[in-house]
Image: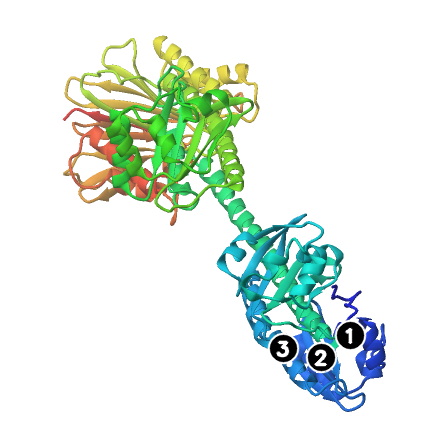
Amino acid sequence: MSVGPTAVPELPLPMAFTSGPDHVVGSRNAAAHRALPGLVAGRAVAETLPDPELLAALDRALGDGVAGVVDLLEPAVTLGCVPAGDGVLIYGVPVRRSAGTRNRGAALQRLAGALLTEQTPEAIGRVAVTTSMQLLDADAGVLFVRSGPATLTTLFGTGWPAEVQARYRRVELHRGRPLSDAVLDGTPVWIEDAAGWAARYPEMAPIGTAGSYEATACLPLQVDDRDLGAIVFSFKSRRTFLPDERGYLQAVAALCAQALDRARLLVVEHSARMLAERERDRMEFLARTGRLMEEPLSVEQRLQRLADLVVPEIADWCVVHLLRQDWVNGGGGGGVEQIAVAHDDPAKIDFVLRVQERYPPDPTAPGSAFEVTRTGEAAFFPEIPDELLVAGAEDAEHLELIRAIGMSSALVVPLTVRGRSLGALTLVHAESGQRFDELDLAFAQRIAATAAVALDNARLYEQQQRIAQTLQAALLPTVLPDAPGLRLAARFRPQTADRSGVQVGGDLYDVVATPRPGRWAVVVADVCGKGPAAAALTALIRHTLRAEVAHGLGPVEALGRLNAAMLRERRDRGRFATVAHAHVDVGDDGTATVTLAGAGHPPALVRRRPPVEPRHDSATEVASGCGVEVVELSGTLLGVFAEVVTPSATFRLGPGDMMVLYTDGVTEARGVDGFYGMQRLTQVVGAAGPRSAEELADALMADVVGFQHGVLRDDVALLVVEVSP
């Protein structure tokens, strides 16, 4: 029996289907053609049957989903209007047919209203059977739905003996049985008494008449030629199914079919929406995973953050194993190491770690992280039966400890990139009682793929970082020399690494002895740019100045020689350097004489040991009892022009006085309030207290780093030379 825009069942009961806000008649059966000639296929109801009450009922059914009943005088008929998909099903019973037609129309209206209140197939099955049984005065009823190409399954049933209902909970379709014939032929099967059973279905007669039942009606449920199942009613007394009775029963079946189809569409729509939302949520999770794994953290930190992200959103437990390489914990070898564990309860993590310590995991166990890492193939355990735990336990105590974890489902997927297995990601459900499915397995593999790519990038990142750190260390003194009469302190901190990795910079400091006893050569330089080219130029500056110092040249002459060397070796015309170069002569009287030359470098600062009298013959600022002199020697950048100007100045340092040289990573540091600048630098250097060179270097570096909240946008180098007090 089909109901839809293209077909309505050929029943004695008039039926038609309309669609759209104009209620255009899409299909009608022969009974409607005879009893309701005003309903013309392809025409709007308002054009051919302009009854205001009918049009209002159609509007309510279509727009509000509310069924209604209308009595027409001409033709004399009671019409029911029931929402059906994207249209309205109109059914009618001519008044002249019988005195009970109004009651049947009201009964259909009652059934339609009851079905409209339910949304799920199960609820509709219950309402369809129980309400219809009351309307039909039936003694038993059952609704079957399609569960396979040749299979029906009970959705709801009541009234039959328990053994009969249990036997027919699932029915295979076979010819020669009333239910199967009704479904396969798409036409009702009517059996009016026990004799009818014996005549038509003798093999089924004992079952059909079990429990004193005699009459049975098997009605197929169809919508638009789609077979949804069948509804069956049985009666304990003989029943004559006259044409009006059959039409009425088929109308009941049509309403039930429409309700089931509506529920099916709702289920499909809900499932599609849930899948779409699940996919959206998982895409967002993958995006978060990608962002997290790209952060400039160590491998161990990234994996722990990943595990913490997975729990509890994806699983109750998350464990990450990694194939040990030289970039994991700085070790070597090729074993598989557990790197990260996550669970909402830290006490449970401690418990599992203690169990693992006492009973180390078997690396040969099937489905283990070790095997998955080795083979590169996932292991999936939708359920974890106790037999699996028994097989993996070493003894009875181990078994009880494993059982205490309460694992219900697990999956292990490899961390694979470019055909190489880096480790394994293990997800476990436990106390939540949830189970992983195939979609979860596929999603876990996507998480693992995202993590594996990021881990491989992290390996390259850390290799680059070590190379840069090694090269940077080679450009700076391992330790400062022991200079009698002086106390030296230097600090260096590279720019905070970004996602491109750490690159060696061009900041340099150095202190070397000169051929003259008691004279020390001091240099602080800053090369433009970063990377190998900047490192090469930094090395050139260091070794050239050391050579010139060894030949006894003064700061001005040495800077001139350095400029010439840079021009000879220049490969990148955009490379230049700023340099502050000084000779510090320590005298027998406990003072030192400084000859300082500058080539485009930031000013030097001289901090006088308190107490101090204000000076007026130099750029001097007094802050909290410490005098700070600014020695400005700008000069010409090196490596750009053939002729350079490198002005110099000579000044004395008394006991406890300090000279501070630094790179522009200090003054040009950016914070929320702008640049660090000379004013703040002068205040920090001149802060109260007779601090040593080491203390001043620590305080200055801490202030610069704190000003930038720990995120340095440039390298910072500084050197403090103090005359021993």
Which of these two is toward me, 398 or 418? 398
Discs 1/3, front: 1
3D distance between C-alphas at marks 1 and 3: 25 Å
Q: For the residue labelled by badge 2, is the local secondary structure a helix, a strand or a loop?
A: helix
Whether residues under marks 1 and 2 lie with C-beta atoms below 8 angstroms apart, the answer is no
Count the marks. Answer: 3
The residue that disc 3 covers is 66
Q: Residues within 10 Å of mark 1 (few under 14, many from 20)?
A: many
Q: Name the residue under label 1.
A: 12
Image marks 3 and 2: residues in contact by CB distance under 8 Å: no
The quadrant holding residue 200 is bottom right
Mark closer to the observer (1, 2) = 1
User: Considering only vertical position in the picture, is 7 above or below 501?
Assistant: below
Within 10 Å of the Cα at label 3, are there few (<14), some (14-19), or many (20+) other Cα atoms? Answer: some
190 vs 474, left or right, is right
Q: Mark 2 points at which residue?
A: 58
Tell me the distance, in whole angstroms, between the alpha carbons under discs 1 and 2.
22 Å
Which residue type does callout 2 highlight? Answer: Leu
Q: Which residue is drawn at 43% across and 16% down?
A: 539
Give the residue drawn at x 74%, y 81%: 93
Q: Where is residue 633 in the image (x, y as percent from the top left)?
A: 38, 31
Q: Which residue is drawn at 73% across and 75% down?
A: 242
Query: Rounded to the nearest whole Å, what is the CA distance between mark 3 and mark 2?
Result: 9 Å
Left or right: residue 278 compared with residue 430: right
Nearest the viewer among 650 and 266 is 266
Query: Which amino acid does the dot numbered 3 rest on?
Result: Val
Rendered location of residue 569, percent (x, y): 53, 15
Q: Would you say residue 602 is visible in this rendering?
A: no
Q: Which of marks 3 and 2 is nearer the N terminus?
A: 2
- Disc number placed over residue 378 in the picture, else none: none
- Residue placed most toward the observer, 304 or 94: 94
* Quadrant in which the C terminus appears: top left
